[in-house]
Amino acid sequence: MSRIEAGFLVLLWALSCIVATPAAAAELGAHGAALDAVGEGPVGHDNGERYPCTGLQAGAQAVICIRVGAPAGGNGSAAAPLQSINAAIAAAKAGDVLQVAAGTYAENVALGAFNAPSSTHLRLLGGFSADFSQRDANAQRSIIDGGLLNPAVQLHVQTAQRCVLDGFEITRGLGLGSSWQDGYGHGGGVYAVLEGNGEIVISHNRIHGNRTRDHTSIDSRGGGIHTRNQSGGAGTGLLRIEDNHIHDNLAGKGAGINVSGRQARLLRNAVQGNTGHNDHGGGIYVSSAATEVRANVISGNVVGASVGYGWGGGILIAGAGADLVGNLITDNYAPTAGAGVFWDEGAVGTMRNDLVVRNRCPEGARSGAALYLDGGPGGPSRVQLDALTIADHVCPGTAPNGAAIYIEANSTLSVRNTVLWGNSREFATLSGGSYTIAYSLTGAAGTGNFSADPRFADAANLDYHLRSRGGRYTAAGWVLDALSSPAIDAGDPAADFSAESLPNGGRMNIGAYANTAQASRSAATDPDHLFGNGFE
């Protein structure tokens, strides 16, 4: 992982401090004063929830505390904690909180079972000190070690409430079962199924070293996390996967994350270095009907490791709807096409403010290192891009091969306010695939398009902010450059620019940071400025 990626992760964890702990406290506190949250709030490695241990209690909502190696016969209080997470689950009732002290828990944690969901919604919280007076899931790691026997954690829940798994290190899990009758071999680290209108929240966990069952030979999915929610009937349940570091997991498909069912939300995760051995989806496999994928780092993932061919190294959307916003997608690999992003067989969605850079070239001089749209039995895929930076996919081959973006099988792509730079070629189409592009930095024809050096701040270190005489965002504050990018104030004149700080020229920038708080500022008078007073 590069220095800039590491810095981006620090930013992700800092952003995770915005988690609404007061709301969580209000939700729990309604059941009694004993459950008012205490402490300093989120530290970025956990959601900040911490409550006084009540121990087991039959009537009121309980906060049950667990510490591995504690003396037998405990009652779940701070003075006499239970020894295992599973023992606490067995003793808990709906709405209870389980607080887990640092240590290694060699158990396969399970709430409910395959085809036998539990109606008991719980909050499982890791990262506590031995006396439960402090919580920091980075300094005090609660490690769930699945022993390569079954998934490290299983959540099979039927509820209209919220079930939470937060602040754990989850490792050495193995996929559940081997067929449709017992789990398909899915879900090495976490296997989570939600029935009903509630939520499952998987957050602030480090999930690594897990694998699906028979990952080199069958279509088993979700090496790090496998989730599914009710897709039929009136269920409106939501799967939330937020602020996790999911790395070095193995699967047939979706080695980092697999989401399926009705709806899911993937926010601020780092999905890195996961390996898919089958042919679709190295880092993330999405087949849930509606999925939001926002502010994630998706890097260094691989697909096709055993079969030798494959699509969608970083993220694959399979015949589903998805909206991608503000993600960094880099250094992913697929042997065939779509090393960064693959929209497959009738997928429909949008990408906005994503940074898609330096994904690895497919084999044999093929196209689609950055982005691939395909049709098939599910119909053509239809995708809209707005304000992306797609850069530095330097791939061999002669036209039309080696293009960063590949569209085929009657799929359609609409692009605007986007920077394409440093790619061997930009677009390739086949079998009726087509695209339109406007108000973009590109070699392609279209309204408002132009081609010029975008003057990135430091592309070699993955800093694709635009240089500006008027001010450029850095983590240390705003700096002034000697030159300005021609991509400043070059967007669609009708596009919203209200999120750009002043001075903003009264017009949207183009590229990944356009119409965000990190958009480069406009200089009052700038000889490098192409569009502030019309075309040069």
Image: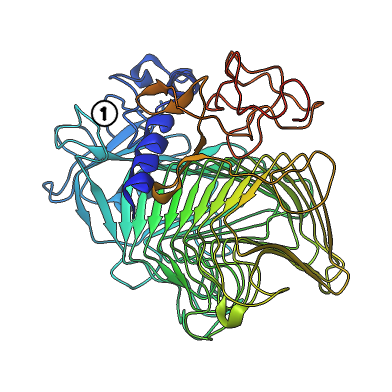
Between 252 and 420, which is closer to the camera in this rendering?
420
Coloration mode: rainbow
The x, y position of residue 24, in whole percent, is 46, 25
* Side of 339 where 56 appears, left or right: left
Quadrant of the snapshot with the N terminus: bottom left
The x, y position of residue 362, in whole percent, is 57, 75
Q: Identity of the amino acid at label 1?
A: Cys
* Side of 464 where 402 appears, left or right: right
The x, y position of residue 180, in whole percent, is 61, 76
320 lies above or below 480: below
Residue 154's quadrant in the figure? bottom left
Which residue lies under the disc numbered 1? 53
The secondary structure type at the circle numbered 1 is loop
Q: Residue at x 32, y 37 (%)?
A: 45
* Mark 1 Cα-neighbour bin, 10 Å: few <14, some 14–19, many ≥20: many
The x, y position of residue 309, in whole percent, is 58, 82
Between 432 and 343, which is closer to the camera in this rendering?
432
Quadrant of the snapshot with the C terminus: top right
* Observer able to see residue 413: yes
* Observer able to see residue 195: no
